[in-house]
Structure formats: structure tokens, C-alpha cells
Amino acid sequence: MQQTRPSHVISPAGREDIDTLIQIDLAAGQLFAPTGLVSEDALHDHVPATVLEQAIEAGDLFHICGADETPVGFTLVSRRGGTLYLDQISVHPNHGRQGLGAALVQHVFQLTKQRKLKQVTLSTFRDVPWNGPFYRKLGFRELARKEMAAWMLDLEAIQAHSLDVSQRCFMVRKFGWL
């Protein structure tokens, strides 16, 4: 368990958390409604329960809980192409702008070190304030198209079904601890 703020703790999520995490994901997704960058269908979509279950089994799903031990956010990671890929980070809007997202990203950095990987990658909207600019403040840099791995291009093609990928980018944060 990682203590963040005095009232928030990051720890592995369990099956009993799945319904709450889906509700958090749905609520956080609504922040994109005014941007026009996400299809209407995608605004009502969430990380599938089966994906969350698999991530729990793999040790790749972590939640952040308040003092009452109720999850208010989560992060989902996976290993892709020799990197730790940040698949999803969601914080319920009622708990936004309190540093919880940054705490979850810092936790991902620690996982990267524990798993002996040299970098974290992600895909995000380039200019949405709680996306690209947020990650840049945490040390990520945008990858040029020529730097993108084949799996990134494949993922981008999947995202194109529901997202405006012209406004998205892949980002990386490298570490020198190995």
C-alpha cells in the first residue's frame, strides 16, 4: 500500500471493487463530453469488467481510496513492447483537482521500477488540460510518429473507431534506474 495524502491510500484493487471502478470510469468519461473528441457511444463506455478482472489477476489494477476506504480513482496498466503502458487512469470528478491522478501516476512510476522496466508509455489527447499537459508536467514527452512501435499504431487504429485520433498522441517517460 502506498500512502498518498493523509486521507488517501493506493492499493491493489479486488473483485469487490469492480462495480465501483466502472462507475468512476463512467463519471470521469463524462468530462470529455464538451470536448467533442469522443463519440457519444464512447462517452457511455467503460473499461469492461472482464478486463478489470484480468488486470486484478495480473496485479495490474490499483485503486486510490479515501478515509472511508471507498475507491475514488484507479489506474490500469499492462506490459506492452517492453514498457509499462498506462491503459487507464480515472478519478471521480467529485474528487478531481486534489492531486489524486498525479499520485496514481507516481504509483505507476514505482511499479515500473519494481518490474525492472525503463519506461512508461501512454496515449492521450494532446491538448485536453487533464491529458497531454498534465502528463507533460509529470515528465512525459510526446513521441514522434517515426518513434511509435507497431503495437502503438495498432492501438491507434482501434482508438480511431471512437476517438478523434488526430488530436491524440503517444507519450513516454523514461527512467535510468536499470
Image (cartoon, grey):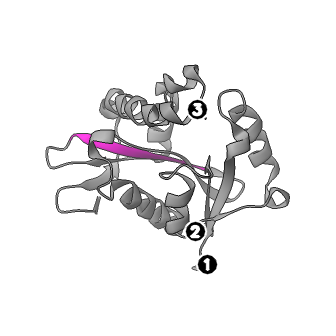
Question: Along the polypeptide, which appears first: circle 1 or circle 3?
Answer: 3
**Is there a contact, CB below 8 Å, between mark 2 and mark 1?**
yes
Question: Along the polypeptide, which appears first: circle 3 or circle 2?
Answer: 3
Q: Quadrant of residue 56?
A: top left
Kindly identify the residue that appears in the image at 71 percent across and 40 percent down.
Answer: 165
Pointer 1: what residue?
A: 178
Pointer 3: what residue?
A: 36
Label drawn at residue 153? none
Distance (Cα) linking label 2 and label 1: 7 Å
Q: Which amino acid does the dot numbered 2 rest on?
A: Lys
Extreme right residue here? 146
Eyeballing the image, is 172 above or below 50?
A: below
Give coordinates of residue 10: x percent, y percent: 31, 54
Q: Which amino acid does the dot numbered 3 rest on?
A: Gly
Locate residue 157 relative to residue 56 in the image: left or right.
Answer: right
**Is there a contact, CB below 8 Å, between mark 3 and mark 2?**
no
Question: Magenta span covers which residues?
Answer: 70-78
Give coordinates of residue 92: x percent, y percent: 33, 40
Give the structural element (helix, strand or loop) at label 3.
loop
Question: Along the polypeptide, which appears first: circle 2 or circle 1?
Answer: 2
Give the structural element (helix, strand or loop) at label 2.
loop
Dot 2 alpha-carbon crowd within 10 angstroms: few under 14, some 14 to 19, many 20 or more: some
Dot 1 alpha-carbon crowd within 10 angstroms: few under 14, some 14 to 19, many 20 or more: few
Q: Which amino acid does the dot numbered 1 rest on?
A: Leu
Kindly identify the residue that appears in the image at 56 percent across and 21 percent down.
Answer: 40
Kindly identify the residue that appears in the image at 29 percent across and 42 percent down.
Answer: 72
